[in-house]
Amino acid sequence: MRVQVQAASFDPAAEIAGFAKGRRDIGAEVSFIGRVRDDSGHLLALEIEHYPGMTEAAISAMAQEAVTRWQLLECLVLHRYGRLAPGEPIMMVATAARHRAEAFAAAEFLMDYLKSRAPFWKKEITQRGGDWVAAKASDEDALTRW
Amino acid sequence: MRVQVQAASFDPAAEIAGFAKGRRDIGAEVSFIGRVRDDSGHLLALEIEHYPGMTEAAISAMAQEAVTRWQLLECLVLHRYGRLAPGEPIMMVATAARHRAEAFAAAEFLMDYLKSRAPFWKKEITQRGGDWVAAKASDEDALTRW
Amino acid sequence: MIEVLYFAWVRERIGLARETVETGAATPAALVAELAAREPRYAAAFADTSALRVALDQKLASFDAPLAGVREIAFFPPMTGG
Amino acid sequence: MIEVLYFAWVRERIGLARETVETGAATPAALVAELAAREPRYAAAFADTSALRVALDQKLASFDAPLAGVREIAFFPPMTGG
């Protein structure tokens, strides 16, 4: 299990290349990569604020729960903060298990919890200024399925 | 959309590096990598037979349905046949969408359909000989959710 | 005349990957009955058709679908891809 | 004495990322009432606590949780990570 919170960019492909490398007991690997999306064509950057200390603790607790609940053989959560350009990777999750159902469920669980329970806040920066991204009720609702 | 059925190995990390590259409208990428799992410690190889022609047509139809149903911005399905060693990648699926729910649902849909509706058959090779992998009722049941 | 393809353990039991068959069978089920009557290896492969799948011109079909106009039929066990 | 942290638009409205507060408040709700009474910028930030979340010693908590023994309290809007 690896949890990393960092300002620096990262290479999702390189993380996947190193993930669960050389193991013969893993049948299924799921990964999720979240990127800065520019819907309007006017986004200059995304600024991500976080709560140092609590962020790492909250994510580690989620990852530990996922590992236990779905008997993951490997688990990776990487999340950035700071100023990110459109198209850049914001975060990724990777899960490895014997079978696909466990790897998928664990990855979705982690994404749902990261969205609403890890202390990150996003601000969209355009030429007009900055707008804090509002939390969606659907993201909060997504937690009820776990 | 790209569908590829091949005997040659492939590099999942390189595929992910090239997937949906340079786009600014994608918020979520999900990938699944299936590998040859050696539960017993005695597996020499996995032999995968397929039905040339029908395989490509069946997978293309599934991928097209996934793209339409979840408004995917990119979709990749890669599946091998022939003789594979433990730990080697068998196949991968990658989906890209604006939001995570669509990317996850499409990837799981594709995996469920590939399992039971794409004409591949697996045979486990050990020193004792070869055993055809039996289809699981749970894999057939998984289709009912779509 | 129809091309008949066999895959996985169906292919192994029959000992053939494909053959051309002269038949007037109206459905896959009727063709299975004809083939099974031919030789024990066919009878063995087709002993339990509920364990088999059939494709007509590379599309999954049922054992009572019409064979008229079909050029290629394939018999195989349930798929185990992914 | 308690360390009080503010994040995102709560931090921006109050104009501070953190401060040390001398208080006898028994709960986050009581501390919010104390702070809101201090200055308009606090009142503005805390106008609607249903739009806010609170963490005690870096764990999410409710506004009526006991503050006794807590060293660090943080106020922030609902998270938007991932």
Image (spheres, coloured by chain):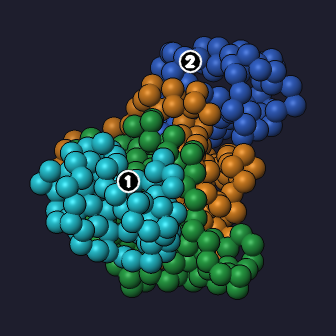
Chain colours: A green, B orange, C blue, D cyan
Identify the residue at image location x=55%, y=17%.
Answer: C50
Q: Tally the marks.
A: 2
C1 is higher (above) or lower (below) than A49: above
Q: Secondary structure under badge 1?
A: helix
Determine which residue is flagged by label 1: D33
Q: Quadrant of the N terminus of chain A?
A: bottom left
Answer with left or right where residue A124 lies relative to residue A19. Answer: right
Identify the residue at image location x=48%, y=69%.
Answer: D41
View extreme (right): residue: C69
Q: Quadrant of the C terminus of chain A?
A: top left
Determine which residue is flagged by label 2: C49
Q: Secondary structure under badge 2?
A: helix
A30 is higher (above) or lower (below) than C74: below
Along the line of sight, the residue nearer the viewer: D66 or C65: D66
- Can residue A127 be seen in the rendering of this structure? yes
Residue at mark 1: chain = D
Residue C47 - label = none
Identify the residue at image location x=62%, y=51%.
Answer: B102
Residue at mark 2: chain = C
- Can residue C11 be seen in the rendering of this structure? no
Identify the residue at image location x=21%, y=66%.
Answer: D22
B114 is higher (above) or lower (below) than D80: above
Answer with left or right where residue B114 lies relative to residue A21. Answer: right
Q: What residue type is labelled 1?
A: Ala
